[in-house]
Image (tube, helix red, strand yellow):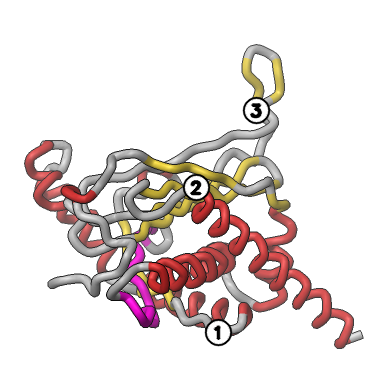
Amino acid sequence: MHAPKTPWHVPDEEKSWMQIYERSDIIPIGKIKTIKNSFGVSFTGVLLSCVSAGISVGLNKKIREKQGFKKGPNSISVATILPLPDHPDKLANHLTGTAFQLPTRLDLTPEQRLQKVEKLLESAKQSTLPLLQRTAALLLNTNLAPVASFCWHNRYFPVGFTNMPGPTVAVSVEGLPVEDVDFAVGGQLGVLGVNFMVLSFGNHIRFGITAEKAVMNRVDVKELIEVICNEINVLYKSCSRSNLSTK
């Protein structure tokens, strides 16, 4: 199966093997929970929807700039880790994963995008793909480098999404409190050009992006972060307006 070509598909021979990394300011978890409860969706659904907004703007901008890509696709393939149903969200379960065709249409409102992404997420949770991936890993023993390389070489997904829940309790190092943490997922073999990460810690979250330098520059990456954060603000304000209208 061949993936629909986009400017974010970058095969190994075209890579610079240099990653550009940017991150957002911290965002209160309470803000995400307010959106989640107001729209009746999942926490991950809110995060993934905001990432989808960033992808929509960033990808269509790149398509306009790049000769040969005059019209953007309505969706893009995104790979993400996903624990098995009814399993705790522990790192040990993140060997399993799934895939989405996230919407990239610019005519969607934030509210419409959120509902579409939530439906995709619910469908993915019921999919057998995570189970098959875990079974294959156990049977083939993917700790063996040649087998892992053959089975997991990315030939399809230009975008990755990682959502890591961090500790909710106070953490200290040598008696000093840890106030913030950060992490990044870099490029891999295959066509992946952009990675989106979310990490929660204490009572806040932070978005991060790593992008292959052959795909975009630092200004582009910062713009993606800005779009994601703006999407959160629009959804949050929409919750406030909804609460006022029901009073």
Element carrying mark 1: loop
Residue 140 sits above or below residue 145 on the image = below
Classify mark 2: residues with Cα within 10 Å, few (<14), some (14-19) or many (20+): some
State left or right for residue 48 relative to residue 233. Answer: left
* Front position in the image: 61 or 95: 61
Is residue 81 in sight in this rendering? Answer: no
Nearer to us of marks 3 and 2 is: 2
Which mark identifies residue 242? Answer: none
- Looking at numbered disc 1 in the image, what kind of residue is underneath it? Leu
- Looking at numbered disc 2 in the image, what kind of residue is underneath it? Arg
Element carrying mark 2: helix
Nearer to us of marks 3 and 1 is: 1
Q: CA distance from mark 3 to mark 2?
A: 32 Å
Q: Which residue is mark 3?
A: 171
Nearer to us of marks 2 and 1 is: 2
Classify mark 1: residues with Cα within 10 Å, few (<14), some (14-19) or many (20+): some
Label 2–label 1 contact, CB within 8 A: no
Element carrying mark 3: loop
Q: Looking at the picture, how far across and down is residue 91, in whole percent?
A: 41, 43
Q: Which residue is mark 1?
A: 108
The stretch in magenta equals 69-84
Determine the residue positioned at 59% across, 38% down. 167
Q: Which residue is mark 2?
A: 218
Q: Quadrant for the C terminus, please.
A: bottom right
Q: Looking at the picture, how far across and down is residue 18, in whole percent?
A: 34, 39
State left or right for residue 28 relative to residue 118. Answer: right
